[in-house]
Image (cartoon, rainbow, N blue to C red):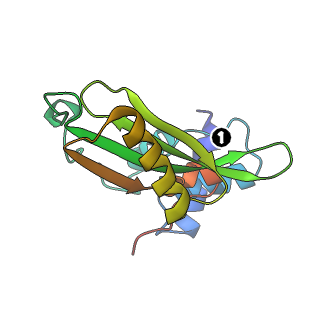
Amino acid sequence: MSPATEARIVEIRVVHPVWGADWIGYQLQRDKMVPVPSRTSVYRALVRHALVAAEQRRRRRADYRRWERARPMELWQLDVVGGFHLSDGVELKALTGIDDNSRFAVSAKLVRRATSGPVCEALLAALRRHGIPSRSSLTMARSSPAASGRPARARK
């Protein structure tokens, strides 16, 4: 990162002492800085200038244990993800379902609104086609702040 970029990061942090790397990166993007440094680069610049305390990651990647089922059809994971924009401006949501053991897609459907009706229809179609799993898990996820172009709100 250039010295000018790092100086701008420090300047923003001094003016806004509660802003973290996400907010500072967002401000750099709004300031039309090219290229915008990554969140990690902004964080490292803040650590170098003692504007934030360097913290060890809560958990190392090696500590994560993948939880997958031992047999197919033991658990399906269903997910609703938004943010698929068509050329005419319509936004669609993707309803997906995977078998946790095989990672086989048991369901994939695009809908305008992920209300109970379309979600149930997609689940029923998957059940008719593949049978009934022992368990299922449904996740309703919002788009990440990065996907929307805005940072997450600063924690107080």
Q: Residue at x 58, y 32 (%)?
A: 1
Q: Is residue 63 left or right of residue 31?
A: left
Residue 114 is situated, as x and y percent measured from the top left of the image, at 56, 59
| Kind of element beneath mark 1 | loop
Q: Residue furthest bottom?
A: 156
| As drawn, 38 above or below 25 | above
Give whichever of 113, 63 is nearer the camera: 113
Q: Residue furthest right?
A: 88
The correct choice, above or below, for 121 with respect to 129 in the image is below
Using residue 45 as the reference point, say whether residue 67 is left or right of it: left
Residue closest to the eye, 129 or 55 = 129
Observer able to see residue 55? no
Q: Is residue 28 left or right of residue 98?
A: right
Q: What residue appears at the point 69 percent right and 35 percent down from the top-left corner?
A: 35
Q: Which residue is mark 1?
A: 36
**Residue 5 horizontal/vertical position (percent):** 64, 42
Residue at 46 percent across and 37 percent down: it is 107
Query: Residue 130's image quarter?
Result: top left
Q: Amino acid at mark 1?
A: Val
Please report the residue visible at 46 percent of the width from the left and 69 percent of the height from the top: 18
